Amino acid sequence: MLFVDMLFVMVVAISFIPILTGYCAHSRGRSFWLWFVLGWVLPLVSFFLLFALIARDELTPARRLLSEAKQILREAEQAAARIRAGK
């Protein structure tokens, strides 16, 4: 029984990086499942690679402006859909 408990704790501990990597990727508009699998296959490499991609997006002014423009467009489309649904 002790072996099963220790095995369960190890699986939960090892699952932390893939879940964290997948969540961070999803919150930045990337595929959760792709980064979750990469987190299992290459845990530390995938985490630091995702960190570098996010840093590149945040530090490059053109990419930041593009993401802001996409957000504005998304909000305008949602507002137009609400107006059409209200008529």
Image (spheres, rainbow, N blue to C red):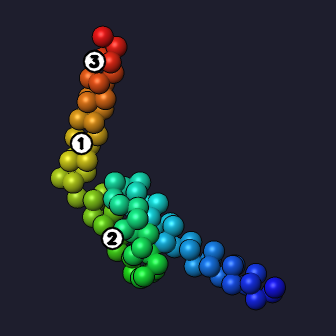
- Residue type at tag 1: Lys
Judging from the image, what secondary structure is the residue with disc 1 in?
helix
Query: In the figure, is residue 49 to the left or right of 80?
Result: right
Q: Quote the CA–CA distance across marks 1 and 2.
A: 21 Å
Q: Residue 61 in the image: x percent, y percent?
A: 21, 53
- Residue type at tag 3: Arg
Q: Residue 68 in the image: x percent, y percent?
A: 26, 43
Name the quadrant containing residue 4: bottom right
Q: According to the image, label 1 marks what residue? A: 70
Query: In the current view of this chain or complex, which residue is farthest to the left?
Result: 62
Judging from the image, what secondary structure is the residue with disc 2 in?
helix
Q: Quote the CA–CA distance across marks 3 and 2.
A: 41 Å
**Is residue 21 among the parts visible in the rendering?**
yes
At 26% across and 29% down in the image, what residue appears? 76
Q: According to the image, label 2 marks what residue? A: 52
- Residue type at tag 2: Ala
Looking at marks 1 and 2 on the same chain, the residue that comes earlier in the sequence is marked by 2
Query: In the figure, is residue 28 to the left or right of 80?
Result: right
